[in-house]
Image (cartoon, rainbow, N blue to C red):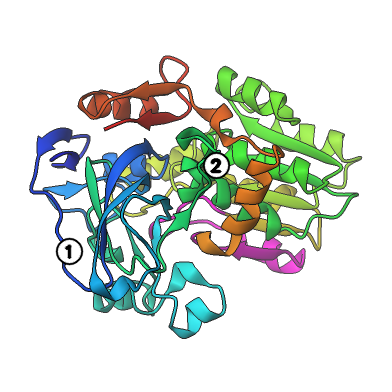
């Protein structure tokens, strides 16, 4: 089969690789009908995340048709069924899965000894996302093996198109969880840093869940336009002070809820901390650039909530923890517990409350995938979200 394969920093190729096979009785094989490039894939493209190996297949936003099932799937999936595959691989049986904390499944990471050394305890296995999370082949390919397939799937109605449901795999529930973690009140101002795909989903989730006003911060004009179309007030951080503008919008009190949809590769315009981060990152003295996190802690209203769906990979420097503690801020983080939210989100899509396909700007075949990684990373050609049809 053909697949997008990682060969090193900024080196993704469309290669011919062996077809996946059933390896365990709870496996299934799906024929991929649509997949996407995620913003967190760019952390792998630029090699900011550890644990990638030459030959790893990329991708964790995938859907398709079931073509083969293991005997242990026990009727949970059948050949011909149409499914979205969450990026989190879940057993459905461990203590964490039973509590709905699917992204920290205790059994699905087959490299849990590595994850435990890095994080203290293992987290779930993830598709196409380093050997820290299991080293599983990703779904930017013609076929995908799905471990624990009796639990790791989302069945979708035939009435909905691939593009309406594909993002149930990651960015829609990720933006949704980021907002739900904020416990939105009708009087809240929700400030969202980053107008990429997750930020766009967070904007629409915050509006749908009843925030008084939603503010989105970015510097890319087409992303800011899309956020405004979704109901947000926008701030171009390259043109004005984020802190001054947020204080103006909140009567000097700051937003009650702040969401970091950027993560480890934050950009800033000629700020001291941004230059500091880039220098330390270049010398391998710091792994992540946490400018957004620092800014959120500073501007958030006391007793407010900070929600972090943006991916961080390792060590951060100069975090104003004194401000965090003294202001009494609540911090909620984590990879997304995808299956906790999908029944509700499928219903909302089916009823017309949400149509996640709005975010798609580019549609390509697998052979165009390597070039689209560069286009997406460099924010060229108005690229916000790429869907691939193998």
Residue drawn at point x = 45 percent, y = 72 percent? 104
**Does dot 1 land on a helix, a strand or a loop?**
loop
Give how far across and how far down residue 210 sits, in percent: 83, 46
Prevailing secondary structure of the magenta residues: loop
134 in relation to 390, above or below: below
Q: Residues within 10 Å of mark 1 (few under 14, many from 20)?
A: some
Residue drawn at point x = 42 percent, y = 74 percent? 105
- Tell me the quarter of the image containing the C terminus: top left
Mark 2 against mark 1, which lies toward the viewer? 1
Give how far across and how far down residue 77 sits, in percent: 37, 62
Q: Is residue 226 visible?
A: yes
Residue contact at pointers 2 and 1, CB within 8 angstroms: no
Residue drawn at point x = 77 percent, y = 63 percent? 327
Query: Per the image, is 326 magenta?
Result: yes
Residue drawn at point x = 42 percent, y = 40 percent? 39
Q: Is residue 111 visible?
A: no
Foreground residue among 356 and 312 = 356
Residue, disc 1: 22
Foreground residue among 105 and 161 = 161
Foreground residue among 227 and 26 = 26
In which quarter of the view is residue 242 placed? top right
Residue, disc 2: 198
Give how far across and how far down residue 177 sits, in percent: 62, 56
194 in relation to 308, above or below: above
The stretch in magenta equals 309-337
In which quarter of the view is residue 322 placed? bottom right
**Does dot 2 land on a helix, a strand or a loop?**
helix
The CA span between labels 2 and 1 is: 33 Å
Q: Earlier in the sequence, mark 2 or mark 1?
A: 1
8 in relation to 91, above or below: above
């Amino acid at each position: 089969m053909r697949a997008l394969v990682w060969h090193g920093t900024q080196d993704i190729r469309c290669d011919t690789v062996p077809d996946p096979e059933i390896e365990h009785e709870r496996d299934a094989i799906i024929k991929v009908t649509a997949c996407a490039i995620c913003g967190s894939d760019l952390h792998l493209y630029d090699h900011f995340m550890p644990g990638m190996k030459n030959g790893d297949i990329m991708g964790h936003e995938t859907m398709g048709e079931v073509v083969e099932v293991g005997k242990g799937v026990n009727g949970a999936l059948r050949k011909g069924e149409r499914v979205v595959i969450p990026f989190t691989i879940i057993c459905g049986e461990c203590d964490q899965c039973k509590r709905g904390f699917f992204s920290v499944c205790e059994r699905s990471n087959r490299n849990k000894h590595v994850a435990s050394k890095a994080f203290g305890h293992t987290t779930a296995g993830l598709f196409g996302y380093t050997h820290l999370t299991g080293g599983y082949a990703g779904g930017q390919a013609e076929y995908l093996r799905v471990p624990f397939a009796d639990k790791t799937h989302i069945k979708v109605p035939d009435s909905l198109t691939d593009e309406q449901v594909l993002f149930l795999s990651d960015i829609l529930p990720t933006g949704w969880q980021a907002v739900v973690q904020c416990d939105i009140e009708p009087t809240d101002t929700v400030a969202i840093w980053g107008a990429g795909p997750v930020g766009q989903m967070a904007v629409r989730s915050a509006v749908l869940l009843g925030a008084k006003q939603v503010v989105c911060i970015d510097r890319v004009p087409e992303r800011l336009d899309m956020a405004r179309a979704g109901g947000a007030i926008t701030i171009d951080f390259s043109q004005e002070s984020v802190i001054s503008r947020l204080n103006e919008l909140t009567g000097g009190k700051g937003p009650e809820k702040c969401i970091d949809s950027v993560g480890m590769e934050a950009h800033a315009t000629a700020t001291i901390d941004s230059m500091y981060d880039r220098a330390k990152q270049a010398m391998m003295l710091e792994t992540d650039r946490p400018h957004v996190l620092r800014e959120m802690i500073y501007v958030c209203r006391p007793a407010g909530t900070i929600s972090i769906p943006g991916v961080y990979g390792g060590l951060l420097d100069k975090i104003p923890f004194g401000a965090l503690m003294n202001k009494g801020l609540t911090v909620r983080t984590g990879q997304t517990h995808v299956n906790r939210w999908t029944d509700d989100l499928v219903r909302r899509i089916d009823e017309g409350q949400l149509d996640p396909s709005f975010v798609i700007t580019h549609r390509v075949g697998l052979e165009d995938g390597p070039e689209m990684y560069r286009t997406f990373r460099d924010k060229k050609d108005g690229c916000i979200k790429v869907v691939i049809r193998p």
